[in-house]
Image (spheres, rainbow, N blue to C red):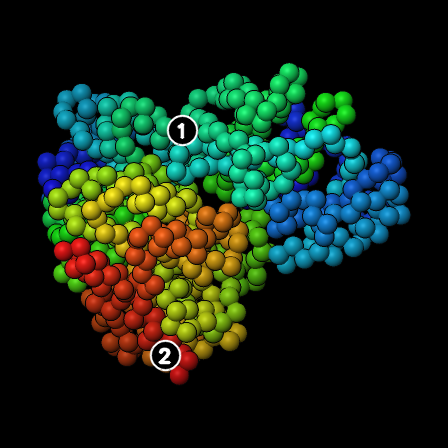
Amino acid sequence: MGVLVHKDFDFIVQGITGREAVNFTRECLEYGSRIVGGVTPGKGGREVYGVPVYNTVREITEQRKVDGTVITVPLAFAADAAYEAIDAGIKLLVIITEGICRRDAAAFIEYAAQHDARVIGPNCLGIIIPDVCRFGSLGGPAVDCRKAFKPGVVGVMSRSGGMTTEICNALSQAGLGESTAISIGGDPVIGSTYAELMPYFEADEDTKAVVIYSEPGGSSEAELARWAKENNSRLPMVAFVAGRFMDDMHGMSFGHAGTIVEKKLDSPADKIRRMRDAGISVADEIGDIPRLVQERLDGAA
Amino acid sequence: MRFYEFETKTILARRGIPVPEGSRAANAGEAASAARELGGALVVKAQLLVGSKAGASRSDESQAVDSPEQAASATEELLKIDDGGRGPRGVLVEKVHAATAEYSLSISYDGTAKQPLLLAADIAGNIEDIAEAHPDRVVSRHFSALVPFSDYVAKEVAAGLGLNGSELNRMAGVIARLARLFLDYDLTQADIQTLARLEDGSLLAVDCFSDMEVEAKYRQKELLAEFGVGEEDTRSVRAPTAFELAGKKIDDDDPRGIIGPVVEFSGNVGLVIGAGGGSLTLTDAVRKAGGDPANYAAIGGNPSVAKAVALTKLVLGKPGVDKIAVMSNVVSNTRADLVARGVIKGVIEMGFEPADKITIFRVPGAWEADAVKILNKYGVEYCDRSVSISEAAKRAVDKING
């Protein structure tokens, strides 16, 4: 099982001839993912590791089923690529491109919602169900990716792509493994927040617990805390909030675009308080996460 | 990216939102002439990046005056304010108008609804404070960034404030203009903390501030050129230090990989650490282990050896730093061997032994086997992925603090 993707998940890569895209296309294929086409306007007819390249998304969707798209195009074309995928009927978009303005992200995310499509990201690395499907660039080369991600019981959601791999690696080392890991994106406006993705994990029988990685900035931790209070979830949750050193650094931005403390809700201290208040375990150290998950699982059994 | 109040007022006035009559003065002399020209009851407001959010009417950031002499002495005093290591960008000398009522308007993005959120209150002040103290007096309304802003949305908000008749229409006009300019100028925050209604019923934006999205700089060039905001000017809350500027230069000089942001702290633990979330986690872990970071310097995106060399030299060369820790989360696309090569080369070029200066190297992931070979050759302690970030940070801090 797992969430959002599956073993027969067919996806395309928009911007497939870019340097990073060529790399992760190879990595995904080696991992066993089904990349059924790529798009780079003006480069139709080429191939990238055997994947046919087209000029437009519709050329692919008109001839076959496409379940998702990974968008990794230069910033100036990112919003357009999202509209193209949505109009072509694709229902799951992973947007890797970094630096998209909030106005643009808010607009295409609203457009996606109107068309029953879900956006993961922007500024994310995608989704992985270990040994089943890798949809995006999580984990790097297939051999490294297999080391970090192992099939298991923990659903992972993270605002940092790199920390998705770090946390999953720790869970894998502890023998817990992951049901599905989602890099949700580090931007202030993203398509899918923790709380919106929780129902998927809730409905997934492989998932027994959820771990979230969060950072200063934004209201999605408060939203998750509210969700946890309002929904009597069967899933124990463990959170880690990075950037506690930023509590007293008002207005300064570190790491991701969304990582800035401007409002009271933005501060790590406020997020930790709200989540603990909602019954979510908050790890004081990153190394504590596997132990806390195990404790919560033992407690639930 | 913060705009000064006088810049925000330029934008508001251009888009049809009235602002008080006034002018900006760079020094006491200019302030006195501005006061002479304006006449009557005036306010002199320091132009600040850091302070303005709290409400520009704060007593320590502005002074009421009613003569050119007073304007001059107020300006001299206000220009002494420390604005994050900078002086104020002059003062704004404005006419004071008697208000019959005051309101507050605020627009920003709501990451939960993924739409712009408009907040309005029938008292003046910082909207976040008002929402906390008087939640019943705040009207909130999301609007779409996808379709053009419709006036009815503004009318709903104005009606929510309890307004009617011409008062409603005037308020709706200001709200609609603010919403449109918020979208048009790629603002991430647009607040009128004091929107005053005057005797004649007109509305005036007395205190305001705005932030523009840094990522939108490329498409707001005209406005930024008008305000004299250069490519390098990030308007950050604290003026960049020489160390930080040097870090930025290293990043700009070589497109391979990303170093940044580089931020100077006061401690002694030199950090060459992984980008994004990893560096946030690592900085916390160092502090949690009792270490005092000398800097924040995130490196990632598969940097070149030369870039890692330059960053190593910058951090290790910082006064007060004797040793560095090279750490990262499990990396996906950064090559650990290139980072290892770079930090070792940097230390050697400074005339030191890598084993003495590099407390720990934890960069698990791509090409780590090659990294281990290089590190072993120089006797640098290496941790693989079985050692957590917390544990790696503890080992580094223990070595540095002895």
Label 2: how many Cα within 10 Å (few below 14, some 14–19, many 20+): few
Disc on res. A107 = 1
- On screen, residue B324 versus residue A70, left or right, reads right
Taking the spot 46% from the left edge, 36% from the top edge, the residue there is: B109
Q: Position of residue A120 (x, y in %)?
A: 29, 38
Residue A191 lies, with reference to residue B143, above or below; the image says below
The location of residue A148, given as percent across then percent down, is: 19, 57
Q: Pinpoint residue A2: horizontal percent, then vertical percent.
A: 15, 43
How crowded is the residue under tag 1: few (<14 C-alpha within 10 Å), some, or many (20+)?
some
B341 and A171: which is toward the camera? A171
* Residue A218 visible in this rendered orientation of the protein: yes
Residue picked out by circle 2: B398
Name the subunit of mark 2: B
User: From this viewpoint, is residue A25 visible?
Assistant: no
Q: In the drawing, what numbered circle is on residue A233?
A: none
Q: Which subunit holds the residue at mark 1? A: A
